[in-house]
Image: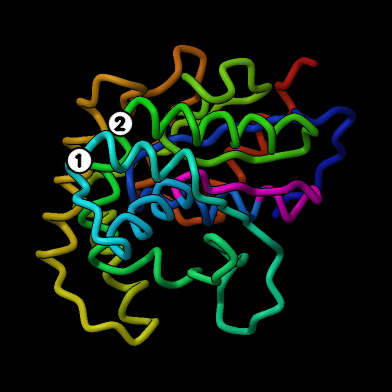
């Protein structure tokens, strides 16, 4: 990467975008460069979906899912594990880091995330985490709802074909048996729900910088974002 000297950095950085657009990977690279925290807020909704499935709660039962979201404890901790995880996800005291990435959770997380009380509970927690600053927060409504006053807002986009191919290669690398067509259909389904929900739909903030990564490498995207830092006015 190009060597730069930064006089002032944005303290809160919001990165939004559809599923599998590379938000978490990019967010972690940016955060690691400056010693920031990177929080993938989608983890919290995955945690709620997983716990609902584990407890036998129908994900279409809004009242029951909402009550669950308001009572469970979700912790995201630095990891000491050596299995490619970026952090530990603890739900009610139990490590569910990989469980939240299961196909069942993938298929149900968007349904769970549309409920207003679920979003309110998770947004409250996300804002508490962001209060100290020096954070890259990743999600679908960070720049529009969770941190509307974020210093820098990025909307990271990519076509569903490209996103499906990336997720397919990633899952294969982890030894999973996956089908490209099923991944693509799952992403289309999530895009439809995320973009059309009544509360906090997926969309770029009015003042977000939109980056389409279809023809870009991860490091080209990072370079593009770092170029924006030179334009940042505190």
Q: Residue furthest bottom?
A: 175
Q: Position of residue 81 (x, y in %)?
A: 65, 81
Q: Quadrant of residue 232?
A: top right
Q: Quadrant of the N terminus?
A: bottom right
**Label 2 residue SS:** loop
The residue positioned 89% from the left and 29% from the top of the image is 7
Q: Is residue 39 magenta?
A: yes
Q: Residue furthest top?
A: 206
Q: Position of residue 133 (x, y in %)?
A: 77, 33
Q: Is residue 125 magenta?
A: no
Q: Vertical placement of 219 versus 67: above or below?
A: below
Disc 2 crowd rating (10 Å Cα; few below 14, some 14-19, many 20+) is many
Tell me which numbered mark, 2 or 1, is placed earlier along the sequence.
Answer: 1
Q: Position of residue 48 (x, y in %)?
A: 39, 50
The residue positioned 19% from the left and 35% from the top of the image is 193
Q: Nearer the viewer, residue 145 or 128?
A: 128
Q: Residue 127 vs residue 189: left or right?
A: right
Q: Residue 194 vs residue 217: left or right?
A: left
Question: Of the numbered discs in the image, which one, if any, rests on residue 115?
Answer: 2
Q: Nearer the viewer, residue 89 or 82?
A: 89
Q: Quadrant of residue 201?
A: top left
Q: Which residue is mark 1?
A: 61
Q: Position of residue 194 (x, y in %)?
A: 26, 34
Question: Of the numbered discs in the image, which one, if any, rests on residue 5?
Answer: none
Nearer to us of marks 2 and 1 is: 1
Disc 1 crowd rating (10 Å Cα; few below 14, some 14-19, many 20+) is few
Q: Vertical placement of 62 versus 53: above or below?
A: above
Q: Quadrant of residue 110?
A: top left
The residue positioned 70% from the left and 22% from the top of the image is 231
**Label 1 residue SS:** loop
Where does the magenta region start and end? 30-42
């Amino acid at each position: 990467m190009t060597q730069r000297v930064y006089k002032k950095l944005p303290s809160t950085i919001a990165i939004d975008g559809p599923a599998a657009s590379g938000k978490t990977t990019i967010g972690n690279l940016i955060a690691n460069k400056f010693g920031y925290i990177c929080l993938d807020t989608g983890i919290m909704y995955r945690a709620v979906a997983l716990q609902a499935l584990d407890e036998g709660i129908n994900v279409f039962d809004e009242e029951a899912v909402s009550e669950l979201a308001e009572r469970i404890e979700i912790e995201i901790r630095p990891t000491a594990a050596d299995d490619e995880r970026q952090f530990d996800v603890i739900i009610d005291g139990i490590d569910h880091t990989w469980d939240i990435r299961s196909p069942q959770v993938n298929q149900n997380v968007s349904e769970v995330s549309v409920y207003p009380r679920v979003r309110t509970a998770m947004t409250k927690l996300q804002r508490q985490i962001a209060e100290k600053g020096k954070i890259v927060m990743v999600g679908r409504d960070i720049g529009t709802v969770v941190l509307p006053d974020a210093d820098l807002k990025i909307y990271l986009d990519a076509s569903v074909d490209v996103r499906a191919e990336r997720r397919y290669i990633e899952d294969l690398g982890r030894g999973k048996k996956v089908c490209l067509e099923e991944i693509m259909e799952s992403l289309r389904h999530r895009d439809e729900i995320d973009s059309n929900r009544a509360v906090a739909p997926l969309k770029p903030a009015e003042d977000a910088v939109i980056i389409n990564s279809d023809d870009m490498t991860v490091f080209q995207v990072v370079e593009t974002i770092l170029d924006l830092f030179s334009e940042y006015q505190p």
